[in-house]
Image (cartoon, grey):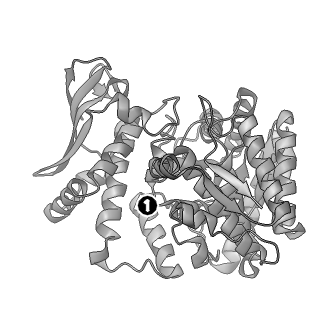
Amino acid sequence: MTETSRASRAMPVVNARIYPRGGLDVLSREEVARLKDATHGGMHDLLRRCALAVLTSGSASDDPRAAQELYSDFDIQVLQRDRGIRIELVNAPAMAFVDGRIITGIAELLFAVVRDLAYTAIELGPEYAVDLESSAGITDAVFGLLRNARILRPADPNLVVCWGGHSINRDEYDYTKLVGYELGLRGLDICTGCGPGAMKGPMKGAAVAHAKQRLDRSRYIGVTEPGIIAAESPNPIVNHLVIMPDIEKRLEAFVRIGHGIIVFPGGVGTAEEILYLLGLLLREENAALPFPLILTGPTASAPYFEQIDRFLRLTLGEAATSRYEIIIAEPDKVARRMAEGVERVREHRLAQQDAFFFNWSLHVPLEFQQPFVPTHEAMAALDLHHGRKPHQLAADLRRAFSGIVAGNVKEDGMRRVEEFGPFQIHGDTDMMEALDALLRAFVQQRRMKISGQYRPCYEVRA
C-alpha cells in the first residue's frame, strides 16, 4: 500500500508512505522499536544507499556514486505505527512508481533491504554475543540470515546459481538467456548476484520457460551485499532478495543454497567467485562432495574460458580442472548436464541425511569466511607464490580479485585508490604475468566497467 505526493525538481521524484506486506507487518511492539532503532542509528546512510539502489533498479550505471549524486536529497525513514511499521520516502526516484503507486516488485525489494539490514544490526550486533569468530558460528549466522529472508525452502533440489559479469556484450547476454530458458524448461530455479548482464539473462530466460511449463512458484533469488548493490542494482526479475553483511557471507550463501553453479563470462568478480568455489572443492574434506560446476558461453567467448582455464592450471594445478567442465555454445547440453548434476546432489543428500535447502556437508574454513578489508597494506601482503597448498593459494588469489572489485565499484575501495593510488599486488613472476594478462584481457574486453574509460585500480609486480 502506498500514499504518495509529487515533488518538483530536475529529476522527477515522489514522496511516498509505504506499508509492508508479509513478514514485516507481523511484528511485536518490541521488534518494531528495535527495528526503528537499528535503521536510525549509524546504519541510516547504509539503508539510504541500498534503498536508492533498489528504487533505481534497471540503471545502466555501475558507478555507486551516480545515483547518490542524481538523488542527493533522497531520504528514507522507518516509522512506528500501532500494527507495525511504515516506510516514508522523500524525493524518491519517480521511475519506481506508476501513476503515483510504487511498483509492487520494487516495494517488496525495498522491504527486503529494511529487513536484512535491520536483522544484521539487531541479531548480529555485538550486544547479542553472536559467534562470528568461529567457522561454525559464521555458518550459523549465514543460515539465520537466509532463513529470516525466507530463502530456505524444504523441497527437492532445483536451485542453480549463475555467476557472470554485469558488463558483458549482447551475444553473451543472449546466450545467458538461452541457458536460463533450458534450465527453466527442466524446472530449475535461478539464483544470481541480482544485478544486470549475466545475472539478469538466466532469470529472464527461465521466466519464459517457467511460464510455458506453468510453474507458478518459481524463484529468482538475488544475493548481494551492501558494497555491491549500489553498483549492481537488482534487476526487475528478482523476486527474492537477500543482502548479506559482507562479500564472504555472500559467497558462502551461494554455495550453501545452490545445488550447482554455472559460470558465464565476467570480470574480476566472476574470477573471485570461481577461485572461492575451487578453493573449497580442492580441500580434502570436500573431495567426495558432488557439486556440479560448468563454465559456459557462446562461441566467441571460447578464448575467454581458455584463458581462465590456463590461469587456473598454472595457479591451482591440474587437480582443479577435475572440478569443472567447460561447455561452449550448447545451452541445451549445459542444462542437461546441470540437471544430471543436481540429481546426483539429491542422491548424495539423501544418503548423508543432509538438508536439501542448505548444504551443511560443505566444509568452509575460517580463512574463506573472515571478511577481507582491501587496504593497500592488505593487498600488498597477499602471498601469491608457488609451493602453497592449492586451497590456500586460492584463498589469497580470491582476496586479490576481491580487492580489485572494491577498487572498481565499491565506494570505500574507490576512495582508497583515489587517495593512495593503485593497489600493489606482488607474487611469483609467472603467476603475476598470468594475472596481469588476465586482467588486461578483462580491460580490453570491457569487462571492468559498463561505460566510460576504465582506469586500473591495481598494479601487478613480480
Q: Mark 1 points at which residue?
A: 245
At horizontal 68% and vertical 40% (from top left) the residue drawn is 180
Q: Is residue 369 above or below residue 313?
A: below
Q: Is residue 171 above or below residue 460?
A: above
> Secondary structure beneath disc 1?
loop
Q: Where is residue 25 in the image (x, y as percent from the top left)?
A: 24, 51
| Relative to 98, 435 lies left or right | right
Can you see residue 347? no
Q: Position of residue 291 (x, y in %)?
A: 73, 65
| Relative to 439, 146 lies left or right | left
Task: Find the residue positioned furthest to the left.
Answer: 82
Q: Which of 432 and 213 is in front in this view?
A: 432
Residue count near mark 1 (Cα–Cα under 10 Å), binned few <14, some 14–19, many ≥20: many
Can you see residue 342? yes
Q: Is residue 95 above or below residue 187?
A: above
At horizontal 75% and vertical 28% (from top left) the residue drawn is 171
Q: How many labels does the image show?
A: 1
State which quarter of the image contains the C terminus: bottom right
Q: Which of 122 and 218 is in front in this view?
A: 122
Q: Where is residue 44 in the image (x, y as percent from the top left)?
A: 26, 51
Q: Position of residue 34 (x, y in %)?
A: 20, 63
Q: Which of 272 and 282 is in front in this view?
A: 272
Q: Quadrant of residue 31?
A: bottom left
**Which amino acid type is shown beneath numbered disc 1?**
Pro
| Relative to 222, 212 lies left or right | right
At horizontal 86% and vertical 61% (from top left) the residue drawn is 430
At horizontal 61% and vertical 42% (from top left) the residue drawn is 199
Q: Quadrant of residue 97?
A: top left
State which quarter of the image contains the N terminus: top left
